[in-house]
Image (tube, grey):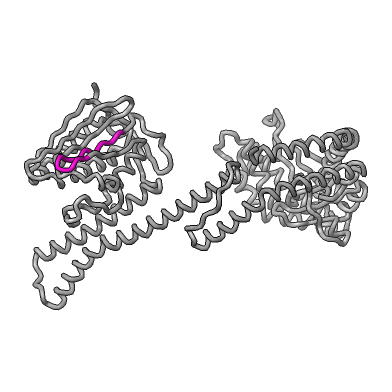
Amino acid sequence: MSFRLRVFGLVLLVAVTAIGVTAWLSVRLTARQIAESQQTATRNEVTTVETFREYAQRHGTWAGIDKVVQRVSTANQQRIRLTNLYGQVTVDTDHMAGRSARPVVSQPALIDPRPTLTFPPGEADERPSPELEAKIGYRLEAVTLQSIIEFRQTVLFARCLTDQRLAPPATTVNRYGIPVVNGTGDDFGCGQQVRDSNAVEQEGDTAFVVGCRGEQRPAACLTKAFGERVSSFAPEPLQLYLGAVDQGAASLIGRPGLAAGGGVLLLVVLGTAVIARQVSRPVRDLTAASRRLADGHLDTRVPAAGRDELGQLSESFNRMASALQAAEQAQRRLVASVAHELRTPLSNLLGYLEALQDGLVAPSRELFGSLHDEAVLQRRILDDLQDLTLAEAGHLTYRRSDFDVADLVDTARVAHLAVAEAAGVRLTAETAGPLPVHADHDRLRQVLGNLIGNAIRYTDRGGLVTLRAFPEADAVVVEVRDTGCGIAPDDLPFVFQRFWRADPARDRATGGSGLGLTIARQIVRDHGGDLVVESTVGEGSTFRWTLPTRGPEPGRGVATGTGRAVRPA
């Protein structure tokens, strides 16, 4: 029996036992209490939010709210916590009781004392004060400006009285939903403070309101502008938390529920102990092996006994360790290859420069041309390394478009014709067009150019290089066939490896950077195809790549475009 089935059977036994013991307790003891508790909590939350909101609107400040919080908390027998929108605590009954704050259990309710400006139907028939309308120019803007001024007057007047421990003023809600104080008078200088503040802020109020001119929905814009403006002087919104983690939990369960829960817990502990005993040894082995692997011992392996999930996990770990070890070895080989490839051109450059510095060699056009060629070789190696790194990481950019592969082959033949003639090699093309595909034209031209260049380079004078393109099922096949020296069977597995050359005697000037075939195969594979090679020593080689007519969907690092048109049939 697999580990999964053993765990399933044990958990099923625990679940059936737990359901049989606790089902009737859960239904009979908690359902009604939970429902009633939720209803009560909802009513309490709505009432509490409205109580605190009315306090902030009547007093113009949250100062003194702690007394109201204490009164409501005592009446509801419930912990209350008020914070601002950034989580900073304003009032917490746990702190008021002299103890540490307990974690909260519910999502916060928003208490926003700022009113919402509303324009009732038929508002166009009403007119505000003539002075404001004459100043602001538009009726709705005048209403908004008047509402801002009146609400500031209400808030500042109430706050002033509250600061002096006086009763808050009487207010009424006007037809726009804004609380308005019934006259400010000169109570203890508060009225004059309100008038001074309105006089100072009038220009800023006007700027907020006139910003909505030209809007298609001026009423909505003015409502938003009103809310933003009054936020600068109205009491800030607070978040209300009711209850705590340990509040009321035991009362819902009761002693029978606690006893049943204890029995279930005991059964779970015993079952877990059995499972732990079965899995502890392989887990310990995996833990120790993981630590050794993290310390750099990539030859670490674990015993993979059994065919259950733990055995498969051990096998997966061993495969992962083998992959890491192979990757490290490949990285070391790559570093060594790069160092080897760069050493010779750098040594040549250094030797020539030292000879020039010591006066052993006279400067000449030919010498500088040679130095330039060496620098170009180094640049080509670095460019190829960068392309290869991007391709293998999946970050090489592809600009896909629709085009005809037959046109691509013809264009590549013409581009390499001069090189082939200079090498004494005949270059021909055979296409069964049209061959439409959706791919990156420039990248595939890079692939084809690399294959043609290699074919010409390894074909002796009088030889032949043939380009062929033809359809095959839902794909297009492109072949580059030469009559060169061929590749030995033992060398074929290494053709697409980095820095591999078929003829070690060839130098970098004639043998390329050693990265072209690796890059070419990666580009073709990124298009959903593949690049393979067939070769016979003394007869020549054939590089064949297959490309789906519709490549894979563009992903990361892939762009699309209209590109070149497909040649009509």
Position of residue 273 measured from the top left corner of the image (x, y, whole percent): 75, 49
Quarter where residue 225 is shown: top right
Residue 337 appearing in the image: yes
In terms of depth relative to the viewer, which is nearer, 511 or 129?
511
Residue at image position (31%, 30%) is: 437
327 sits left or right of 458 in the view: right
Spot the residue most to the bottom: 358
Instruction: Tell whether position 259 is magenta.
Output: no
Residue at image position (76%, 46%) is: 108
Spot the residue most to the top: 569
Quarter where residue 6 is shown: top right
- Up the image or down, 493 lies above or below 436; here it is below
The magenta stretch spans which residues? 535-546
Instruction: Tell whether position 536 is magenta.
Output: yes
Quarter where residue 397 is shown: top left
- Up the image or down, 475 lies above or below 78; here it is above
Quarter of the image with the C terminus in it: top left
In terms of depth relative to the viewer, which is nearer, 319 or 407?
319
Position of residue 169 measured from the top left corner of the image (x, y, whole percent): 85, 49
Spot the residue most to the front: 305
421 sits left or right of 342 in the view: left
Quarter of the image with the N terminus in it: top right
In terms of depth relative to the viewer, which is nearer, 324 or 64?
324
Residue at image position (33%, 26%) is: 474
329 sits left or right of 219 in the view: left
